[in-house]
Image (cartoon, rainbow, N blue to C red):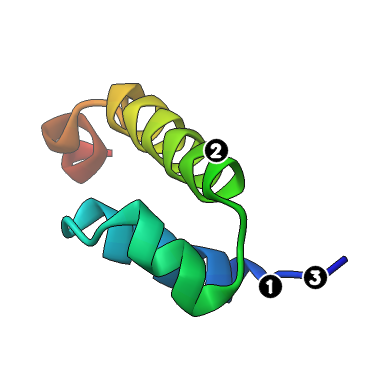
Amino acid sequence: MKRWSACRKKEVVLRLLRGESVDALSREVGGEIYRLEQWREQALAALDAGLRERGGDPLARQLD
């Protein structure tokens, strides 16, 4: 089984998000389609969670 670094997974996911075909990318990188789609879904979920985080009021931070 091939080990994938986080950096390599990120590169693959970014290519998928840019619209590259999952079939072609799967053949190119030698990864299963279901796994590439799973990484994409995980990345989108993390993006959603990150965008929902509240960083507080920027004005209040400046005043502190």
Residue 19 disc label:
none
Type of residue at label 2?
Gln
**Mark 2 sits on what residue?**
38
Q: Residue 40: image x %, image y %? A: 43, 43
Q: Are marks 3 and 1 in contact (CB under 8 Å)?
A: yes
Picture coordinates of residue 8 (x, y %)? 55, 75
Viewer-side residue, 19 vs 8: 19
Q: Check disc 3 and report the residue beneath it.
A: 3
18 vs 6, left or right, is left
Placement of 61 over or under 57, stated as above or below: below
Q: Residue at x 41, y 26 (%)?
A: 49
Q: Say which residue label 1 marks.
A: 5
Assign a secondary structure to mark 3. loop
14 in relation to 37, above or below: below
- Amino acid under label 3? Arg
Which x, y percent locates residue 26? 48, 63
Gap between marks 1 and 2, in whole Å? 15 Å
